[in-house]
Image (spheres, rainbow, N blue to C red):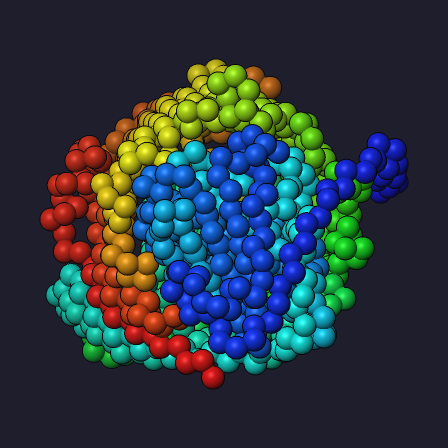
Amino acid sequence: MKYILLLFFAFTGFAQLFSQSNEIERKAYTTTRIVGDAPHIDGLIDDKAWDLVEWGGGDFTQRQPDDGAAPSVQTKFKILYDDKNLYVAFLCLDPEPDKIVSRLSRRDGFDGDRVEINIDSYNDKRTAFSFTSSVSGVKGDEYVSNNGDDWDRNWDPIWYLKTSINNEGWIAEVKIPLSQLRFSDKENHTWGIQIMRLYFRNEERSIWQYIPQDATGWVHLFGELNGLQGIKSQKQLEIQPYIVASTETFEKEEGNPFATGKTSDLTMGLDAKIGITSDITLDLTVNPDFGQVEADPSQVNLTAFQLFFPEQRPFFIEGNNILTFPISNSNNDNLFYSRRIGRRPQIRIDTDDDGEDNVQEYVKKRNNTRILSSMKLTGKNKHGFSWGLLESITHKEEAEIDSLGYRRKETIEPFTNYLVGRVQQDLNGGQTVFGGMFTATNRSNVGPQADIVDEAYSGGVDFTHYMSQRKYFVSGKVVSSKVMGNAKAIERLQSSPVHYFQRTNNDYEDVDSTKTSLSGTGGSLLVGKRSGQIIYDVGGSWSSPELELNDIGFVSQSDKIAQWIWVQYRKLNPFSIFRTMRVNFNQRQEWDFGGDELRKNFNINTNIDFTNLWSMGSGISYNKRASNADLRGGPSIVYPGSYGYWIWVGTNSRKKVRFEINPWWEWGQNDFSKTTGLWTSLTIRPTDALNIRLIGSVEKSHNEMQYIGTTKFNMEDRYIIGKIDQTVYDFSLRLTYVLTPNLSIQYWGQPFAATGTYSNFKRVTNSTAEKYDERFATLSTTYNETEQNIEIDENGDNLVDYTIGNPDFNFAQFRSNMVLRWEYTPGSTLFLVWNQSRSDAASLDRNSYDHLYGSLFDRTPRNIFLVKYTYRFLL
């Protein structure tokens, strides 16, 4: 700890020593209250009300590509207000209006010529509301937090936009209800504002309040909006009931009373948004339905760890940058992972589904736990104190089991309450921010035989302090967790891939079968620089062996200490043939709490934008890895180092046709591994309303040390590894057709196939030996076609000592999703949805790519047809 304190004080002193004033001159615009009729939003700005104020702007500054230069075209604006709304008019001058690019997209598509206003109505120098107007009439909106570091495009307020093109350029006329903004309750207001314009055909961004590209932060450098007087809190009350009718078709299974080939359902629910005060908002959902959300992409996971998939459900996405607490900036570990709410039921049930006792049992169960209700309470006051609170209740889920007509029910997920709270306090205009988070998971009536915990709690505190005009910063956080349950549940956690206390070379933790709780800690410390041509991070983190967050958070593996350095050299202004250039150096090292090195990584990469608007990147890396989890509770294993190289090239994104290509290669020392991959993307815009994107990737690899399984021989564990030759094909098609800014059809389809063939079977002998060939011994094996297993003769006596199952796999899957979305009135939407999925674990003697168009499409698919109707009442 003393070294950390010395580092902090030395860093602070250094930053203050080199502190220099680089304050930017602030602009200000003065608005006025409307007297008489408010403007009619038609995109023409010919109402008399607009004569009440002068044009602002006309003096925008280019930010990209030529930072600080005069823009190719200028932009003007006017702002008015009344008791209910804020009105904004934009005049986007263009000497060649016939060349204005008007591209249609779904909401938040951000395509074509556009203009944007950011409003810091809290005037807290850290948060803002962003409203983007595309010339096509498509709206984009984002909630900006952490001084511009986070932009949440899932925030969808109600506001109004009309546009038009004339001989001067184009016009956008906007009405923003004050109920959609958050501000303090006082007589006179000063808000921060920024106005930006993208001149699409030059890919040029200009701004009203000049902020250099290399400036640290965003919101705290806004200009000012003055003249707001007497505006009062708008009692926002939005009620959005919905009704969903769905039909599901699937393959009928003879004898299975649950697999009849078709089911139908009708559900109802309610979403609501309530403005309790001008700076406190309550979001509520009752019996939510997320049928319009796309399925997760297919993946093959040969590791011991769970995969991380991003949240896609609208209620949990909106505002998720408030309720987040990452443990470090280098992985997905977080105190809150919203996908735990409504997760797949966790309690396993024992059935005779193979008919081994001459009784075939059939099971009907849900794939996901039903959410009864969720609510989010968020707010921020004039003193810089912000908070977020989320509570969700999930249904008790039961599996229905049929055995010769007799039916019983077994609990597979108990009734559960989830609670998440987050607070932050800004000091000195956001120069210092500190806060905390608390989470709780409480399950009811968890049986003594269930292996999930009854209660799980976690909490943390964090701080960030900026110095030298926010050029330098230091941040840190500390977290802790505690889970409680029956001894069976806690023993399962200790033996799970997150912990693996039973590892044979683990001399600092043991599985305790009598424990009924588990407590751990984690945290990080980071110092860095965020301004100038050279920026960097230097940091470290830890998660103790007992840290457990996966009831409501995410941690893939505990028992880890990490250190990293990241340095970037950047040139943000054009030079020669380059528009921008960034060169990065990364170094990272990890250890477990026993002092064993788990990873050593170095890489150098560069990202370049050219003046012709093509882009490219490339990188080289060296990785040295060990794992205390790959042998699934066995000893740690050390792998030879590996070298990697990748390159990426993309053509001009403004064109009707864009192509990207990204090949990569990796070579392991001692020839233990090799990977070759290729990713490509083709984007086509036949018209301004139609966007087609095709993505495809192929990866071929082999690995001589892939874990296969653990078995017993002579009362000793045998950890079996082998060579895997693996091929993965992954393709996707996304087609978006936008008939109007409020009516669109989108299709996504993903054919996926993977094959893995094992050979050269080995048993682990000395997993951490210095020499590669001393870590294992090659086994004599024979494939038994009748039993479809691998027979192993370990001692060479021509007798079978033990067997393992055939680990080869050949898997194909196709998933698709088609959604018609019509926002027939602001905030009210009709969805027509078709989901389809097909899977096939085909015979191992067939090439996996063939399954994409062969036996996979001979199978009966699982189809879901869904109609969702919502209507938003403004009260």
Residue 123 location (% of width, % of height)? 69, 61
Is residue 577 or residue 231 the one in the foreground?
Answer: 231
Is residue 869 or residue 622 the one in the foreground?
Answer: 869
Question: Residue sitting at 25 percent across and 75 percent down?
Answer: 245
The correct choice, above or below, for 397 with respect to 786 in the image is below
The correct choice, above or below, for 412 with respect to 753 in the image is below
On the question of residue 341 being in view, the answer is no
Q: Quadrant of the N terminus?
A: top right
On the question of residue 50 being in view, the answer is yes
Residue 98 location (% of width, % of height)? 32, 41
Residue 366 location (% of width, % of height)? 34, 68
Residue 865 location (% of width, % of height)? 21, 66
Is residue 823 or residue 765 the one in the foreground?
Answer: 823
Question: Residue sitting at 72 percent across and 36 percent down?
Answer: 528
Which of the 4 image quadrants contains residue 529?
Answer: top right
Identify the residue at the far bottom of this view.
875
Which of the 4 image quadrants contains residue 493?
Answer: bottom right
Question: Residue sitting at 42 percent across and 70 percent down?
Answer: 40
Q: How many marks?
A: 0
**Relative to 209, 112 lies left or right:** left
**Relative to 726, 406 lies left or right:** left
Question: Residue sitting at 86 percent across and 37 percent down?
Answer: 16
